[in-house]
């Protein structure tokens, strides 16, 4: 077989095994999902003390709970006695405490061991020391972010810094007041593809003219393969005849109060490593959280966030939901078509990125550095 030198306009992708190898996925669980800040749950999903949600973060089951003081706490979902899972349900509420279904060790909402069979006969047991193992938690943008690392990385650098890198400052996203918005619709997608294929797809728009006819009608510059989310501060402008970010381009709900005039009629897309996409439009926000569960399967939970007035009044959000729901389905179908090829001999050495995709190479460099560290 003859080989030719690769033209300068093309750069190589990761080799195919990065998307199919369980050992690579295990490294990603340890060095990416478990060592970084991971967006776990919408804070408003836990409205009252005792509300909880079980979240898989890498190889660990994490319990996020609303405590008695109204704050959120996170713990490893593991009983300190013999290791049974404390909560087997994905979400729910308890009155005052969590009880292990195996031997009835019982923990309060702050994680302290408060009861167990014959516990009073074991006065040497420190009830805090043998409480649930805490997990670092920060709330921002209306979401709870957790980190399993003993010494978590800087939240300001890694999470807030991703917003600054894309928008230029934090003030820009503050104008959307995400923590005050309400979930108008949530759709969960079970995508049979590696999480990196989804990330890479989101980072480029070379495919937009091919598979996103509705999106390119609303955002005409995307038809040229322009990756708006790569350029600092740039928002893709709505088409001249487009009134709102809806499936048919008709009017939406009016600009959110804090959104600046120069941000009106524009779309901003942000990637927060490792597993979050944020999409900002004048009247709502689309917030994706990915939960990689295997080398070839990823759960994506997508929230459409609107002002409380829009949701409480019962206004029909279906036209704006439908636009990005179609985009999601089109993207995820493309990723699922790509996944089988990752194990093909044709992709053993990877593929190539054209100039409008070259910035994906920085993501690949970042990942390989983390996995080798």
Image (cartoon, rainbow, N blue to C red):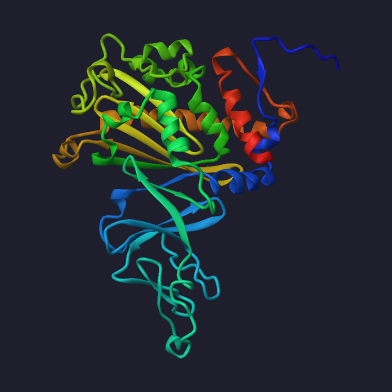
Percent x, y for residue 16?
69, 32
Going by the picture, which residue comes out furthest to the right? 1
Count of marks, rendered view: 0
Q: Position of residue 306 (x, y in %)?
A: 24, 35
Q: Which residue is painted at 46% across and 10% down in the image?
A: 224
Q: Farthest bottom residue?
A: 121
Is residue 60 left or right of 243 when viewed as pictured? right
Task: Name the residue furthest left.
Answer: 313
Kindly tell me whether residue 188 is visible in this rendering. Answer: yes
As rendered, which of 113 and 256 lies closer to the eye? 113
Q: Is 125 located above or below residue 33 in the figure?
A: below
Q: Quadrant of the N terminus?
A: top right
Q: Position of residue 138 (x, y in %)?
A: 39, 48
Residue 250: x and y, percent? 23, 20
Give me the residue at 30% from left, 71% from top. Answer: 96
Residue 359 vertical placement versus 55 (above, below): above
Q: Is residue 217 above or below residue 199?
A: above
Image quadrant where one finds the C terminus? top right
**Residue 334 located left or right of residue 257:** right
Report if residue 329 is visible in the image: no
State whether residue 212 is above or below residue 299: above
């Amino acid at each position: 077989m003859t080989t030719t030198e690769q033209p300068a306009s093309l750069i190589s992708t990761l080799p195919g095994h990065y998307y199919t190898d369980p050992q690579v996925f295990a490294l990603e669980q340890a060095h990416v999902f478990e060592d970084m800040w991971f967006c776990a749950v919408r804070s408003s999903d836990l409205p009252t003390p005792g509300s909880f949600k079980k979240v898989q973060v890498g190889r660990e089951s994490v319990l996020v709970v609303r405590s008695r003081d109204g704050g959120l706490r996170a713990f490893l979902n593991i009983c300190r006695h013999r290791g049974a899972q404390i909560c087997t349900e994905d979400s729910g509420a308890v009155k005052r405490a969590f009880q292990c279904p195996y031997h009835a060790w019982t923990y309060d909402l702050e994680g302290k061991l408060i009861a167990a069979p014959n516990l009073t006969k074991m006065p040497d047991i420190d009830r805090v020391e043998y409480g649930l193992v805490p997990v670092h938690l920060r709330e921002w943008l209306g979401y709870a972010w957790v980190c399993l690392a003993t010494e978590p990385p800087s939240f300001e650098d890694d999470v807030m810094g991703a917003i600054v890198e894309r928008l230029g400052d934090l003030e820009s996203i503050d104008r959307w007041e995400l923590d005050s918005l309400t979930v108008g619709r949530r759709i969960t997608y079970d995508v049979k593809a590696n999480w990196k294929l989804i990330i890479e797809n989101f980072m480029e728009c070379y495919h937009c003219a091919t598979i996103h006819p509705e999106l390119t009608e609303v955002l005409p510059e995307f038809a040229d393969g322009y990756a708006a989310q790569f350029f600092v501060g740039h928002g893709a402008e709505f088409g001249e005849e487009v009134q709102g970010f809806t499936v048919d381009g008709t009017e939406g709900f009016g600009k959110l109060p804090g959104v600046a005039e120069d941000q009106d009629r524009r779309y901003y897309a942000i990637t927060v490593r490792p597993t979050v996409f944020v999409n900002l439009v004048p009247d709502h926000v689309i917030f994706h959280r990915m939960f990689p569960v295997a080398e070839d399967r990823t759960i994506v939970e997508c929230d459409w966030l609107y002002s409380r007035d829009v949701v409480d009044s019962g206004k029909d959000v279906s036209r704006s939901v439908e636009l990005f729901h179609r985009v999601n389905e089109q993207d995820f179908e493309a990723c699922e078509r790509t996944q089988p090829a990752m194990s093909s001999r044709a992709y053993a050495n990877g593929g190539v990125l054209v100039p409008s995709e070259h910035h994906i190479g920085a993501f690949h460099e970042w990942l390989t550095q983390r996995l080798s560290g």
